[in-house]
Amino acid sequence: MNRRDVLASVGVSVMVPGVVRGSESVVDEWMSPDEYRRRRPDSLDGMEVEESEWDIESVGTRIESVYRREHPALRIIYVEDNDFQLWVGGTNIVYYPESVSEGVEFLKLFNEQVSYRVVNSESGFYGSYAIEDWTATTNQNYTDGEYIAVIDGQRELFEDSTEMRDAVQTAVLERIDTTDSSLTL
């Protein structure tokens, strides 16, 4: 049984580091690269898609559909032979949708509600997510190996960048308003 089947078998919305799923049951429908291309929109909120494609021996075709490259970057990634065929992202915030349309809906909500700013420094960078009056700011210092985030006014120190990114991702996803949407984050 693969990871996708195990997650589906528990019948709940599962959140683990780096993996955020909708609350719908996992669809067993496998999607071919051509089917993905038919389902993904050519534009998103007036932004035309740019697509890159690779054939990778271990996972088959990988297609990256980018709607905006500058921050916050908006993209859908399709992988032919993977437990999760789709993931969408707004900068470092990643969501694993059940379908292309659900992924597009997430990107629209992210684009409407989240502002992101990045400032590079000599030793790393600062990244700041804002949703209305709420903020999460990260400080990744490559020189000292420090990973600090200030999430809603609370300073937190992390062991590594993955732990920090997961905490910020969870906090941002919890604040995206899905009231008028079918998404459950």
Image: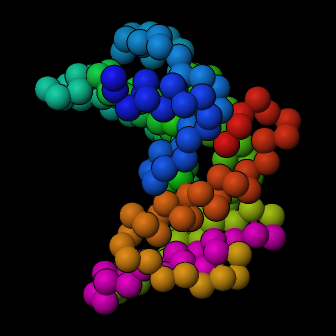
* In-front residue for pair 165/25: 25
* Image quadrant where one finds the C terminus: top right
Query: Which range of residues does the magenta coloring cover?
Result: 133-151
Is residue 8 visible in this depiction of the protein? yes
Which percent across, then down, holds residue 146?
Answer: 38, 84
Is residue 120 visible in this depiction of the protein? no
* In-front residue for pair 86/110: 86
Is 174 situated above or below 56? below
Question: Looking at the image, which residue is at 55% across and 81% down?
Answer: 156
Is 28 situated above or below 167? above
Which percent across, then down, holds residue 53?
Answer: 29, 28
Residue 167 in magenta stretch: no
Q: Using residue 109 as the reference point, say whether residue 117 is left or right of it.
A: left
Q: Residue 108: which quarter of the image? A: top right
The number of numbered discs placed on residues in the rendered structure image is 0
Which percent across, then down, holds residue 98?
Answer: 56, 25
Q: Residue 180: which quarter of the image? A: top right
Which percent across, then down, holds residue 109?
Answer: 71, 42
User: Given the current orientation, which residue lies at the most extreme left position?
Assistant: 57
Question: Looking at the image, which residue is at 70% across and 54% down?
Answer: 174
Q: Using residue 170 as the reference point, say whether residue 119 is left or right of it.
A: left
Question: Looking at the image, which residue is at 69% across and 71% down?
Answer: 135
